[in-house]
Amino acid sequence: MPVTDRTGLAALEIRNFRNLERADLTFDPGLNLITGANASGKTSLLESIYYLGRVRSFRTSVADQAIRYGQQGFRLVGRVQAPSGQPVTVGIERNAGHYTVHMGGQSVRRLSDLAGNFPVQVFSSDTASILDGGPRQRRHTLDWALFHVEQRYRDTWQRYTRALRQRNAALRAQASEGEITAWDAELLETAQAIERFRNAYLVNLSPYLQAEMERLLPGAELTLQYLRGWPAGVELGVALADSLSRDRVHGYTRHGPHRADFRLLMDGHPVAAHCSRGQQKSILLGLMLAQVCYQQAVTGTAGAFLLDDLTSELDEAHQSRVLASLRELDAQVFVTAIRSDSVNLSIWSPGRVFHVEHGSVREVV
Ligand SMILES: Nc1ncnc2c1ncn2[C@@H]1O[C@H](COP(=O)(O)OP(=O)(O)OP(=O)(O)O)[C@@H](O)[C@H]1O
Ligand SMILES: [Mg+2]
């Protein structure tokens, strides 16, 4: 097992988050199993943990949906073991349409500052739509992982989106050709850098992905096909020039890395259309685990991995492969299941088990 700095969530206070009125919990640095009947609050608990790393939900883009019915706001306070070695307290409040975020007693302005302290990855029925949903979510999956392994990516990405926004504003304002193409030099320079970072990332990720797939679905050959966001065989500058008149009609820039996407193929067939539900779950988990594994190799920290509904769609053999892969990762793991006896915990010691009932969480000892 790799030796890494133990990062993760040591403790969490929850107030008025979904159906969780109040919970004060301490977690294991290894496995935390969360059990309970349907609608007890298991996914809500995972969602609150995810919030501490990302300041957003994986279930909704409407933050106020997570406020407990009839309440003004929610509050989450977590003690995070950061890569620097010192535990830091992170507080997130949502009230009157705003977030207030604190870290180590200081107010946090750039939410991206939080992410490095507590990298968190989730797999749930909502993330499963990465396979068959629109490209935005897939792009985000790649980009989020890249932000964590390549410091320079964030700046480059910000420069690119700034130039893109300006160019789109000029397009919408029916500005002159010169005013529109004035942004192209910055756009092209940063697009090329993004392209280099993404290609390098995918090359580096590949052995991790192969290793995960070998473990989770032995014998299957998985290919990740990257689509860069403009036509093959054409330079971006040419693609931009060719589509200028169309871009003016639509009021936005149609080509560039902001339109990138990827496709997963198993034995040459598109995964979403060709694979069984269980295979799809294993494949997507394999991709996420590979990303976390590579992140761990680069940064020395795996962060937390949240896995909602381990047992759904996976037979026992595949569940134990997933658990073995998670164990290998040495990340902090939060897994939900309806019953604890359905999960084979023998490879984790000791781990903690929590039971959720009508929104109250207790540790099972
Ligand atoms: N803002 C809210 N305030 C109060 N309760 C909410 C809020 N949003 C959702 N709920 C309720 O919280 C309950 C718990 O939902 P959750 O998705 O966490 O359950 P779960 O334990 O994951 O169930 P399942 O096993 O079916 O996935 C549900 O009954 C849901 O309707
Ligand atoms: Mg659930």
Image (spheres, rainbow, N blue to C red):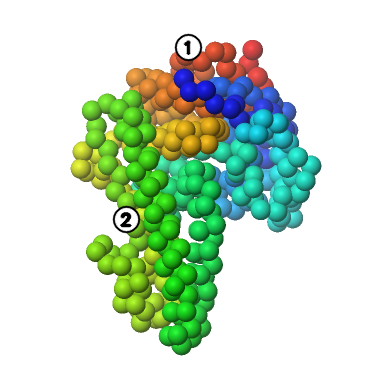
Q: Name the residue nearer the viewer: 251 or 194.
A: 194
**Location of residue 288 by image quarter:** top left
- Extreme residue in the left direction: 268
Amino acid under disc 1: Ser
Residue depicted at x 61% and y 37%: 118
Q: Position of residue 47 (x, y in %)?
A: 59, 39
**Location of residue 358 by image quarter:** top right
Residue highlighted by disc 2? 227
Q: Quadrant of the C terminus?
A: top right
Q: Position of residue 80 (x, y in %)?
A: 67, 33
Residue depicted at x 53% and y 36%: 299
2 vs 1, front mark: 2
Is 210 located above or below residue 249 in the figure? Answer: above
Tag shown at residue 5: none
Seen in the image, is 279 located left or right of residue 31?
left
Tag shown at residue 346: 1
Is 94 located above or below residue 343 in the figure? Answer: below
Amino acid under disc 2: Leu
Q: Position of residue 220 (x, y in %)?
A: 24, 32
- Quick one: SS at disc 2? strand
Tell whether circle 1 marks a residue whose Cβ is less than 8 angstroms from ligand 1: no
Task: Looking at the image, tell me whether mark 2 or mark 1 is earlier in sequence order.
Answer: 2
Residue 295 seen anywhere in this rendered image of the structure: yes
- Quick one: SS at disc 1? loop
Seen in the image, is 269 located left or right of residue 337?
left
